[in-house]
Image (tube, grey):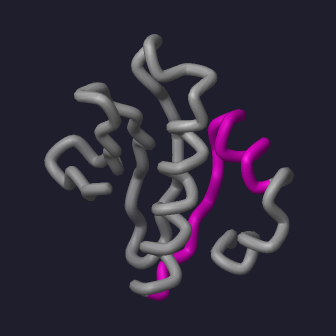
Amino acid sequence: MIDNTDKHRFELTENGLIVSAEYRQHDDRYVITLVEADPALRGSGAAGRLMEQIVAHAREKNLTLVPRCSYAMAWFKRHPADNDVVG
């Protein structure tokens, strides 16, 4: 996963295709506004793997994540153990 700061999004490449999570940054808070996968990756779990890496990054950097898109909100509901980074 990379943090593409120019595009304000986290990106994960799988099989040459991109799944991304757009964000707005406010100090140490990252508001996740959109999680989107290339159509060929949909249903493959790629977006979930990206979210796992975003959570790991947030823990490592002591960041807070604020899910605002429906996918990110649903992902955190399915993974309550990762809510320690949600604020």
Q: Nearer the viewer, residue 71 or 31?
A: 71
Residue at 44% across / 13% down in the picture?
A: 40
Residue 32 in the image: x percent, y percent?
Answer: 53, 49
Residue 10 lies, with reference to residue 60, above or below; the image says above
Q: Nearer the viewer, residue 83 or 31?
A: 83
Residue at 21% across / 51% down in the picture?
A: 4
- Asked whether residue 67 is drawn in magenta, I would say yes
Residue range in magenta is 62-76
- Asked whether residue 12 is drawn in magenta, I would say no
Q: Quadrant of residue 72?
A: top right
Q: Nearer the viewer, residue 27 or 74?
A: 74
Most extreme residue toward the front, as rendered?
A: 15
In the image, taking residue 77 as reference, residue 39 lies left or right, namely left
Residue 85 in the image: x percent, y percent?
Answer: 64, 76
In the image, taking residue 31 as reference, residue 17 lies left or right, namely left
Residue at 48% across / 79% down in the picture?
A: 63
Most extreme residue toward the left, as rendered?
A: 6
Q: Quadrant of residue 47?
A: top right
Quarter of the image containing the N terminus? Answer: bottom left
Residue 57 in the image: x percent, y percent?
Answer: 43, 73
Question: How many discs appear?
Answer: 0
Residue 56 in the image: x percent, y percent?
Answer: 50, 73
Quarter of the image containing the C terminus? Answer: bottom right
Residue 40 lies, with reference to residue 2, above or below; the image says above
Residue 38 lies, with reference to residue 11, above or below; the image says above
Residue at 49% across / 70% down in the picture?
A: 29
